[in-house]
Image (cartoon, grey):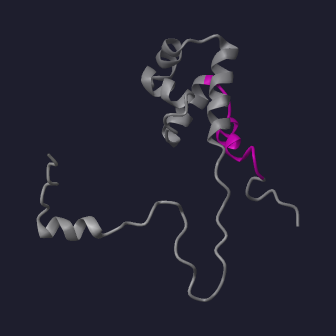
Amino acid sequence: MQIPAPRMPPSLKAQAKVQKPALTGQGSAPSDGRVTILPPDPDLTALRVVLARLRAERGWTFDELADRSGLARRTLIDLEHGRTTGNVTTWHALAHTFDVPIEQFLGALCDDHTPPGTATP
């Protein structure tokens, strides 16, 4: 015996049919005919590798890094394993904890492409 699908109220049916655009950074083409050039994707793997390398160089466990940085142990694990990217405040705290310029972390985002402002004419 087949169970029928639950009936959806008409108001919900209308909402279900509306598709929202994906958050890809790709908007519609400009109306003046110009081509939109999107920036390259940031290298998020390089960002977490820098974190793992700095932590390993100091021999710190996640618990030690959490104590030193004031960040949650779970946050640090998620950052290093690529489950989250954190925010500027997080990376600022880590830069101070490791006593390195924040560029050491954020610069890694451009490891697989030319960073903005460095292209030669």
Q: Position of residue 81 (x, y in %)?
A: 55, 28
Q: Seen in the image, is 58 located left or right of residue 29?
A: right
- Quadrant of the image occupied by residue 96: top right
Say which of 22 and 101 sits in front: 22
Q: Main secondary structure of the magenta part?
A: helix
From this viewpoint, is residue 76 visible?
yes
- Residue depicted at 55% across the width and 36% down the height: 92
Q: Position of residue 6 (x, y in %)?
A: 13, 55
In this figure, what is the number of numbered marks? 0
Q: Position of residue 121 (x, y in %)?
A: 88, 67
Q: Position of residue 62 (x, y in %)?
A: 52, 16
Is 49 in the magenta? Answer: no
Say which of 10 and 98 sits in front: 10
User: Residue reaching furthest front?
Assistant: 1
Say which of 76 and 36 sits in front: 36
> The magenta stretch spans which residues?
98-113
From this viewpoint, is residue 72 visible?
no
On screen, residue 99 above or below 113: above
- Residue depicted at 56% across the width and 87% down the height: 31
On screen, residue 63 above or below 111: above
Is 102 in the magenta? Answer: yes
On screen, residue 38 above or below 79: below
- Quadrant of the image occupied by residue 98: top right
- Residue depicted at 63% across the width and 19% down the height: 55
